Amino acid sequence: MEDHSKEKQHIVSYKENFGTWLGLMLLTALTVAVSVANASLITLTVVTALVIATTKAILVAYYFMHLKFDHKLYRIMLLIITLLFSSFMLLTIVDYLSR
């Protein structure tokens, strides 16, 4: 059996949870607004939606998955994954636009 007595409890305030929830709601509203307003700019809409979705995923990982309380290595790994995802998306978009 593993000894879990050394684990720290992280108590997050209601204010912080509400702020995170509000940020996610605003980003969701922004996603909807971009998809409706920029319907003629398909590529820009997709890129913007992906950037907003990535931001929401990082926000969820940071607060609700308690990444902010974990080792710094996990945050660095998340940054590397985000940069790789962004570069692959950029390369895909450039390839798509150059056809």
Image (tube, rainbow, N blue to C red):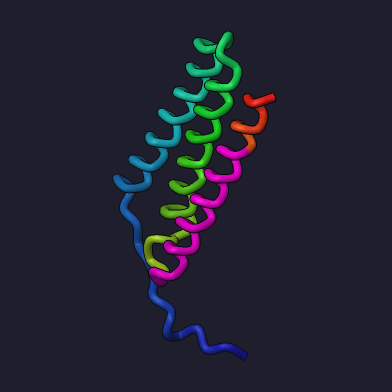
To which quarter of the image does residue 39 belong? top right
Residue 41 locus on image (x, y percent): 56, 13
Instruction: Report the label total.
Output: 0
Residue 85 locus on image (x, y percent): 57, 47
Q: Residue at x 55, y 52 (%)?
A: 84
The N terminus - image quarter: bottom right
Q: Which residues are magenta?
A: 71-91
Q: Residue at x 55, y 34 (%)?
A: 50
Front-most of residues 56 and 8: 56
Is residue 88 shown left or right of residue 63?
Answer: right
Residue 46 sits above or below residue 63 on the image: above
The residue lying furthest to the right in this view is 99
Residue 11 locus on image (x, y percent): 35, 62
Front-most of residues 57 and 89: 89
Residue 15 sits above or below residue 27 on the image: below
Q: Residue at x 54, y 45 (%)?
A: 87
Residue 51 locus on image (x, y percent): 49, 35
The C terminus - image quarter: top right
The reply to whether the magenta stretch includes residue 32 is no
The residue lying furthest to the front in this view is 98
Q: Could you tell me what secondary structure mostly forms the magenta stretch? A: helix
Residue 52 sits above or below residue 72 on the image: above
Residue 74 sits above or below residue 45 on the image: below
The reply to whether the magenta stretch includes residue 73 is yes
